[in-house]
Amino acid sequence: MDRSKFIAGLAGPVFLSLGVSMFINRDLFPDIVHQLQNSFPLIIIAGAIALAAGLAIVRTHNIWSGWPALVTLLGWLLVIGGVLRIVLQRQLTDIAGSAGANPAFLTGGALLMTAVGAVLTFKAYQ
């Protein structure tokens, strides 16, 4: 199995599930964001997990053409997001607090996650 399909087969269903969950539980997400804002250890742990996952993708997958470029881009976004969570917890919680209270932002995030998850899942299992 090629690396692109393997990584997409892992990440796709996760992103698809998260996106669908954001739609189904739209009313819960402002509370979830508020609770996460007050948990700096959890933010650091989430950052470390995102950084490790991103580095695993980036170190094994560097393809910038066709749909596999989405996998590489996802890896880099996880690396950047992980580093930012570890280094800038307080600043990110302020941003997340205002974004998490915005229904349009949550809907956009849910759409993006669902779309990326669906594309990756489709490509991995076709």
Image (cartoon, rainbow, N blue to C red):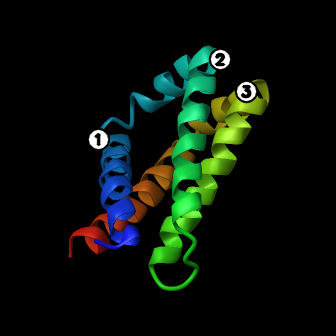
Q: Is residue 33 above or below residue 102?
A: above
Task: Compare residues 29 and 81 and report the one nearer the observer.
Answer: 81
Give x and y (percent) for residue 118.
Answer: 32, 64
Q: Earlier in the sequence, mark 1 or mark 3?
A: 1
What amino acid does circle 2 point to? Phe
Q: Tell whether label 2 touches label 3 (CB within 8 Å).
A: yes
Q: Is residue 4 above or below residue 7?
A: below
The Cα atoms of the two marked residues, 3 and 2, are separated by: 7 Å
The Cα atoms of the two marked residues, 1 and 3, are separated by: 28 Å
Q: Give the label, 1 or 3, closer to the camera.
A: 3
Most distant residue in the bottom direction: 66
Check disc 3: other Cα within 10 Å, few if <14, some if 14-19, many if 20+.
some
The residue wearing badge 3 is: 89
What amino acid does circle 1 point to? Ile
Kindly state the secondary structure of the residue where label 1 is placed.
helix
Task: Compare residues 26 and 63 and report the one nearer the observer.
Answer: 63
Task: Compare residues 98 and 61 and report the one nearer the observer.
Answer: 61
Kindly state the secondary structure of the residue where label 3 is placed.
helix
**For the point 36% across and 44% down, which residue is it?**
18
Q: Which mark is residue 24?
A: 1
The residue wearing badge 2 is: 40
